[in-house]
């Protein structure tokens, strides 16, 4: 056995980007790209201690690379790999999930090693098709599947969906007893130490990372922990931060405890789908995405492979249900639908969807049965007749948000009432203008009445807008997205405000009956607005229950020079 933590070369790229490689076990090397100064991780959270992107090489009779690295390490990483192996002989690239910080160099690698087979979950391989736009050899794996590399390296895969991407898998090497988990058990912590040498130094970052990335999927964390509980693990090879080696039971126990607490206290919504049946899983994930914008816990459950006991337990605990119609020919799924019906109770809310397989269990008779039991319908049935469109994906996401908002509405109203203190009255004196954000992205359009808008920079001209996390338009306002900021006019805003404050059903055309014309960036300009500004999102910052979205302004026009901006005066500061 090779001694752990053997030092080898550290290579500096420039400034604070470095690469470290270490042999971590027999025929196994860790290649860690150290990003010392990264201070923000996309939209997720601010970093305090940089991060690392960890990749691993296993050289049995066949060779396998587990994950790649972030694009910023392109040359250093690829040159380094080329120095370790002849890429023409690389047999497998195992993709733990397809987020760009680990998969950013797959296309480059594919060009250097076109013979390699990419191993991943079904969803990961679908995502990759859209990422690399070129043919590649692939091997789809699910929980329990094994891959023999020779020299005793028998790899076993474990599905870990939603941790924190839908396509996540773990890989366990039976020879070295290393479990490769990518994001899971990771932390954004950049240090020369390869392993968890000093637990006390790492605990805060480990918890912070869990809260940001894993907490929203606490039930999926518990499901994944259950799948790995029989494995004898010597090292957890994570995708970020140090590898876990010295304190594995304690680290795993932290995940278990935190997830159990989270799963116990939150509103649970179970989304049932049928894996492999038409677009069932894709729609379920969009519904889940919408739900996660609200303060609920989500559990995605495959009807085809779950037993009646588990389904019954989940339905008993759940406050909300979303159910994708299974195929009429899937006997286990049929049985589970009956189990759901038998366990459902009148205080629950439900939403149903079809996935367009042509053999779906009929949706309306089932809908009637749930209504007879007394369940409240959170959104009208989502019906897919042909292929999944972006519009339908968005509709499913909005439906999920509606369901979540229904479950959390009492809590929101209560907190508004309970906070009517002098502080809130004081905060309420912060006044603002009134605006309508309008956007069109492909087939999908969005609109939102906004008041928390302010100019935020002069060169380039930029604005900052606070958007609540559960707003449908939020998913259309990521870096690179474009929109129009319509400034409403004093004395001429009530019609637009009334229209856009309505509750729109998922997928509804928000612009029906409203006069618009098209901006250069494709978004609708409201003909009755005082001003329009065409904007491009540059960055987003998470700020508690809102995203602060900073955008640059490309062009704009005032329709009436003497017009004044509508002003929004509030009584209290705990709501808009
Ligand atoms: Fe570290 Fe989900 O990427």
Image (cartoon, rainbow, N blue to C red):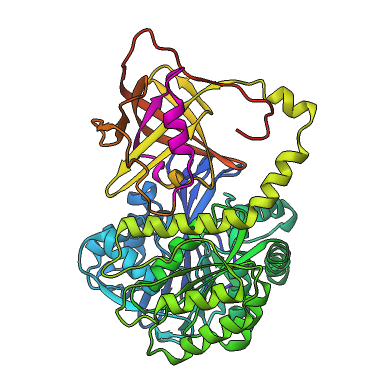
Q: Nearer the viewer, residue 510 or 79?
A: 510
Percent coordinates x, y for residue 256 in the rendering: 69, 69
**Image height of 241 relative to 270, above or below:** above
Residue 148 visible in this rendered orientation of the protein? yes
The question of residue 493 being in magenta is answered with yes
Percent coordinates x, y for residue 193 in the rendering: 61, 55
Percent coordinates x, y for residue 119 in the rendering: 36, 74
Tell me: 180 left or right of 499. Answer: right
**Image height of 212 relative to 422, above or below:** below
Q: How many marks?
A: 0
**Image height of 41 relative to 349, above or below:** above
The question of residue 486 being in magenta is answered with yes
Image quadrant in which the N terminus is located: bottom right
Percent coordinates x, y for residue 205 in the rendering: 66, 51
Tell me: 2 left or right of 110. Answer: right
Tell me which residue sits at (68%, 73%) in the image: 317
Residue 120 visible in this rendered orientation of the protein? no
Farthest left residue in view: 134
User: Which residues are the magenta region?
Assistant: 476-504
Looking at the rendering, which quadrant does residue 515 occupy? top left
Looking at the rendering, which quadrant does residue 195 occupy? bottom right
Tell me which residue sits at (66%, 80%) in the image: 313
Image quadrant in which the C terminus is located: top right
Tell me: 431 left or right of 170. Answer: right
């Amino acid at each position: 056995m090779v001694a752990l933590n053997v030092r080898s070369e550290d290579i500096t790229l420039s400034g604070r980007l470095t690469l470290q490689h270490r042999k971590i076990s027999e025929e196994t090397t860790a290649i860690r790209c150290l990003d010392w100064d990264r201070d923000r991780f996309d939209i997720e959270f601010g970093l305090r201690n940089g991060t690392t992107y960890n990749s691993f090489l296993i050289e049995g009779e066949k060779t396998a690379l587990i994950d790649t690295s972030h694009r910023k390490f392109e040359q250093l990483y690829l040159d380094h790999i080329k120095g370790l192996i002849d890429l023409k002989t690389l047999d497998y690239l195992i993709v733990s999930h397809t987020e760009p910080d680990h998969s950013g160099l797959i296309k480059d690698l594919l060009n250097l090693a076109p013979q390699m087979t990419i191993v991943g979950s079904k969803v990961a391989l679908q995502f990759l098709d859209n990422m690399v736009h070129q043919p590649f050899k692939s091997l789809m794996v699910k929980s329990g599947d094994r891959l023999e590399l020779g020299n005793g390296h028998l790899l076993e895969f474990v599905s870990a969906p939603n941790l924190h991407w839908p396509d996540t898998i773990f890989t366990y090497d039976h020879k070295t007893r290393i479990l490769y988990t990518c994001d899971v058990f990771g932390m954004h912590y950049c240090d020369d130490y390869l392993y968890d040498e000093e637990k006390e130094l790492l605990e805060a970052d480990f918890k912070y990372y869990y809260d940001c990335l894993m907490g929203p999927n606490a039930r999926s964390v518990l499901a994944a922990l259950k799948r790995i509980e029989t494995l004898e693990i010597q090292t957890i090879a994570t995708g970020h931060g140090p590898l876990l080696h010295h304190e594995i039971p304690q680290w795993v126990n932290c995940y278990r405890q935190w997830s159990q607490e989270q799963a116990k206290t939150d509103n649970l919504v179970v989304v049932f789908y049928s894996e492999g049946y038409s677009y069932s899983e894709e729609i379920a994930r969009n519904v889940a995405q919408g739900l996660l914008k609200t303060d609920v816990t989500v559990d995605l459950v495959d009807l085809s492979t779950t037993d009646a006991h588990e389904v019954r337990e989940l339905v008993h605990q759940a406050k909300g249900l979303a159910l994708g119609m299974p195929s009429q020919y899937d006997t286990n799924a049929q049985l589970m639908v009956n189990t759901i019906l038998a366990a459902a109770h009148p205080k629950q809310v439900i939403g149903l969807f079809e996935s367009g397989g042509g053999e779906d269990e009929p949706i309306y008779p089932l809908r009637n049965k749930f209504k007879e039991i007394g369940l409240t319908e959170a959104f009208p049935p989502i019906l897919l007749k042909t292929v999944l469109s972006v519009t339908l994906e968005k509709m499913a996401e909005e439906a999920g948000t509606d369901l979540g908002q229904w479950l959390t509405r009492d809590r929101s109203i209560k907190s508004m009432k309970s906070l009517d203190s002098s502080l809130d009255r004081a905060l309420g004196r912060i006044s603002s203008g009134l605006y309508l954000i309008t956007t069109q992205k492909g087939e999908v359009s969005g609109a939102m009445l906004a008041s928390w808008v302010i100019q935020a920079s002069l060169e380039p001209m930029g604005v900052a807008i606070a958007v609540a996390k559960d707003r449908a338009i939020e998913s259309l306002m990521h870096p690179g997205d474009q929109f129009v900021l319509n400034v409403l006019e004093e004395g001429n805003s009530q019609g637009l405000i009334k229209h856009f404050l309505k509750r729109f059903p998922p997928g509804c055309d928000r612009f029906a009956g409203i006069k618009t014309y098209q901006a250069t960036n494709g978004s609708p300009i409201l003909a009755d607005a005082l001003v329009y500004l065409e904007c491009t999102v540059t960055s987003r910052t998470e700020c508690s229950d809102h995203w602060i979205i900073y955008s640059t302004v490309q062009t704009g026009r005032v329709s009436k020079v003497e017009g004044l901006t509508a002003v929004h005066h509030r009584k209290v500061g705990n709501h808009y």
